[in-house]
Amino acid sequence: MNNAKRWSAFEVLLAIAIIAFLLVVHGAIPFYTVPTLGQAVWLSGFSQSLANGPVLDLHAHNFGLPKPASIAFGLSGALPASLLIRLGLQAADAYTMVVAFWLLVAFASAYKISRALGATKLSALVGGAVWLSMPMLWAHAGYSMLSMGMALMSFYFLGAVRLFLLDPRAHSLSVSSTVFYCAAAVISIFMDGYTFIMFAMGASALLVFSFILRPDVRLLLLKVALPVHVCSMALAYLLFTLYIGRSNFAPQSLDFFRGWGLDLSFLVVPTTGILWLPDLLGFSVSRSDAVYFGDYSVWSTTFALPLLIAGLLSCWLVRRDCKLAWGILLITLLAYYMALGPSVKINSTKPVAWQQAESTQNTPIMAASYAVMPTGNAWLSDKLPGFNVMRASYRWAVLGVFGLWLLVMMAVARKEQSHRAFCMLLMLVIVIFNLPNVVQKWHSGKDRRVLFEQIDDALIPEVAQHVKPGERVAFVPWGNDFIAGYLAAKAKFYTLNIGGDKNLAAAQERWPSVMLALGGNLGVSSIPGIINMLSSNEADTVVLPYFNMLWAPHLWPCMDETSASLTPNQVARYSNIPGFTCPSQHRRELADVISALSRNPYLEVNETDLFATVRLREQYRSPEGKAKIIALGLEGVSYPLIFGKSARAPLVLTDGWYPVEPQLVWSRARAKLTLPTEGHCAVASCVAVLKFNVFGASPTRPLNIEIKSSEDGKLWQQSLSLTASEGHEVRIPISTTLAVQTIEFEVLNATSPHALVGALDGRTLGLALQQIDVLPE
């Protein structure tokens, strides 16, 4: 009967006021604030690139070359933002509007769940505020759509409530409930993989509990709800794997899971500078990555003591008249158990020597010896698909937070008629404890929008002036280049660079060897690689940025020159980031490199205050000119070439090779070498002798290799079947007429250490080339 009542003017105004306040808490007021900067720029790169292309194309074509890039997570945010960009909105406002939209969906879903549990409109509205005020949600804004995935747990589980908590009088499942649940599953997996797994596990548990506790609807659950659940999750997973082109990402070590596991002290004692009231009361403590494992998000987001107390109390209050509460409590406990990771941590810190050593203070991973005791769930993180890539273990806590919130709303729905004032006070206390410094939050959000505008107004036009639309660009040295996608999409050029660790790993699998060789520190020794990049047609322009490609989009352009007002916590965090220097300083650091590039007879260099561009001079841009440069560059190569020792050895790696390691270089399944031959053989007939190892060869698994080359116009080829991994040699005839000779390899049954033995390395490995020599035949 309550549900049928119309909304009063007071209830409407209260809902509007609560929503507006929550948008301020999340920093998501369109046209005024931006919830985060770095991740907003990163995701906006995908949105802008999608907006540049056809409406139905869900891949970014401006970056992550040579193939179109799939966004590893956040498509459910990037796609609607791209539609808003098409309508003329600036990227910053499109991003904020999408965040605001999903927060409204999360709030409405929390309200709907509360009403389904029996709460009044007023309590349901305040209950929605409790859910969206949790620091687990708003403090993850820096992780972009992960925070939206967490907030939308209410939306996902509203679908589960509609599907599994059926009315006893129901004889069928409505089409709307089925479609809603399927849509929730698809939106979930394309929003964030972490929350999709949590949703799948939590919903499965809810189905089991409903089946056990409600015999009156068991047949309907078994015949209809279960197939809908399984098919929805399977469809979502299938669509995602088809989109990203793989079934899983590379797993991480258990030490990584342990480092990002929830420390129980973080759960009950907040971190200074995060929550307004605990800071005011002196209840918070200072934490940093100099002392604790993991990263800032682990200890800044996980405080939940008020909700923990309220949730446990609520479960006790409704234990007799709502048996489902025990099921929700079990889900909550299991979620927090998974959040611990492989080991129990209680204020576990790095060794004192580590804390005092600047070079190791940012080490996030944690050995088992530094924890209290094992939890017993290591096998899940090590072996179970899906679970083994959820490396930030603490994030399971959001499912625990949602379970506690459900318990509170169950108690409110059942006790508010007799204890209305107490229920309202309980929820308000939780909200107040959860709040950040709202005034500071507002100003920070405005600062972020101003910084986003500065990137649009200062950097983008400068890049567009010096890089032509349609050009193929390489930013070097490459890294986790958060801003590369946005620059390419806005200025409409194409680049191999990309941001996001999963997207970077996927792109690297297809990058040419010349690009892979240009990672790490940039020095004068990198110049042959830059020339090789330009002359091999892999790039038209090489850009040397003076700003940090990862951190500048988080705080433009650097900490010392930003116009944003920084909190002490932010100053401490950004001060400890290696390499996050201002453009003017980095420009001075690269002065010798720029000078050497400018003196090179093949190159044309242009400098700005923010970057330098390097191109081939006009006379060398033709195919003949590039071929001449390649031949001249190889003139300095002398044999034997020992990989890891010979500085010029990487120049012969044409395609299909990973970065050079200390004693060898691994190939992919297919690879090419370009060897200089002219002047290296004083007799009539010579051979190139290649010494190499292979991966995965054994008597039970022979490795088959095809080698091809051209000797004086004739095709030379040889097939090898290897049954051992080490100590191989092949002799390839060398041309007496050509200046260079190309050799091609194909390892027919190449595999990865992960696929073969379950190791962490997911690279497909072929040959491990150690040495090349040219000798008389």
Image: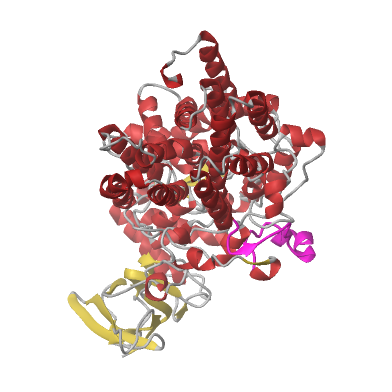
Quarter of the image with the N terminus in it: top left
Res. 228 visible in picture:
yes
Residue 9 screen position, x and y as percent: 51, 9
Quarter of the image with the C terminus in it: bottom left
- The magenta stretch is 340-367
Q: Quadrant of residue 184?
A: top left
Residue 138 screen position, x and y as percent: 58, 35
Res. 611 visible in picture:
no
724 or 593: nearer the viewer: 724
Identify the residue at image location x=77%, y=36%: 279
> Is residue 314 one of those drawn in magenta?
no
301 or 42: nearer the viewer: 301
> Is residue 345 one of those drawn in magenta?
yes
Q: Quadrant of residue 185?
A: top left
Note whether 578 is above or below 556 in the view shown: below
Residue 349 screen position, x and y as percent: 73, 60
Instruction: Give the farthest residue toward the top.
Output: 9
Q: Quadrant of residue 277?
A: top right
Left or right: 423 in relation to 7: right
